[in-house]
Image (cartoon, rainbow, N blue to C red):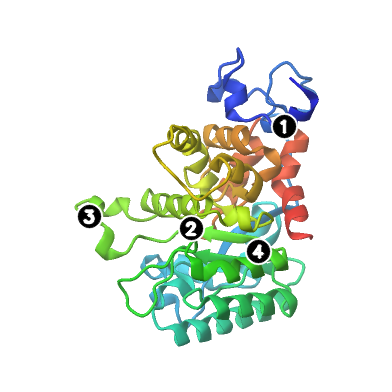
Amino acid sequence: MKPENQERITRRGFLGSTALATAGLIANCKPASAVLCGEEESDSAKAGSAPIKGKIALEEHYALPETISTSSAASHSPEFKVQILDMSSGRIAEMDRGGIELCILSLVNPGIQGIPNVLQAIALARRSNDYLAECIAKYPKRFKGFAALPLQDPQASAEELTRCVKELGFCGTLVHGFSQVGEADSALYYDLPQYRAFWATVQQLDVPFYLHPREPLASRRQAYEGQPWLIGAPWGFAVETSIHALRLMGSGLFDEYPKLKVILGHLGEGVPFGIWRVDHRISKGALVTKAKLPLSQYLRENFYITTSGNFQTAALNEVLLEVGVDRVLYSVDYPFEDMSEAATWFDQTALSESDHVKIARNNAEKLFNL
């Protein structure tokens, strides 16, 4: 292998070797930056070792008291509602249980994206961001924030993101998928031409854009009929978000704005697993995108992927092989997921000590200039 390729061992290169890329095998190797077996074992994580402290988690949600009834938190238990509304000692105690030093907080799904009235969306985004800033000011060493944006109006979103980053000190934005505009049965995706100026602002501010899932619209759920459990987090979330991510890649967005940084949760919403076939079928020539490069190259160079709500080692190994350890970030998806369960899984994965620390905090420190 040539030296310049040693920093990026992808699934393609690894599977081309004599090694078998099974979850069991990879679990005993150094993933991504050093996936090949046979390296020294002294740096490997050992079962029963002390929990990793100082984690940074970045898909952790809060709700506004006045809008919780219209959010995805509405259908959950009273205990859950207490957790998602708590922006003080209770949340910090849960963070401590999971070894989390810092949480980057975001408004719960569907956030601002589910408000068809543009003026209402703009007003609630500002209210949400001001509220979050007030909470962060009380615990500045434990909380930071992602801006909620009214992407029903791209220009207003660019202005609000600029305010949140420059005045409130936010780390970027987390957006809940497509935005409904004007009427409930509408959906705008951000590869559309009217969003190019917004993306220019994101790149200029040099902050990440977290593309978070939301449910498909009720009018577009024919494939889910009779199976309501499929619509949300178990499956529909990933389908909706992976399509949106592929739309961004295929639109030429990252050719125009090559320094954009987009985050996907839940170990990539299935995109790392399927990206080879996407590129393969496009390469046959009958399918045409506006992208200048293979879509997998954008995945490796413009996307970051978190562990939120997907605590499976085989899936983590796949992501590490596809994008590399420097592009993976620790997250929980609290309070939809448990801080301790996430930590127990992650702390016991057979990663090297250096890779554990990269995913747990160092990659986030670098991405967010913390």
Find the distance from the CA under tag 1 to the CA under tag 3.
42 Å
Q: Quadrant of residue 228?
A: bottom left
Residue type (three-letter) at the residue carrying disc 1: Ser
For residue 110, say whether it is visible. Answer: yes
2 is higher (above) or lower (below) than 88: above
CB atoms of marks 3 and 4 within 8 Å: no
Q: Residue at x 48, y 47 (%)?
A: 269
The residue sitting at the front extreme is 285
Residue named by callout 2: 336
Residue type (three-letter) at the residue carrying disc 3: Gln
Upstream in the sequence, badge 3 or badge 4? 4
Q: Residue at x 40, y 65 (%)?
A: 77
Residue named by callout 1: 33
Residue named by callout 3: 222
Q: Secondary structure at mark 4?
A: strand
The residue sitting at the left extreme is 226
Q: Nearer the viewer, mark 1 or mark 2?
A: 1
CB atoms of marks 1 and 2 within 8 Å: no
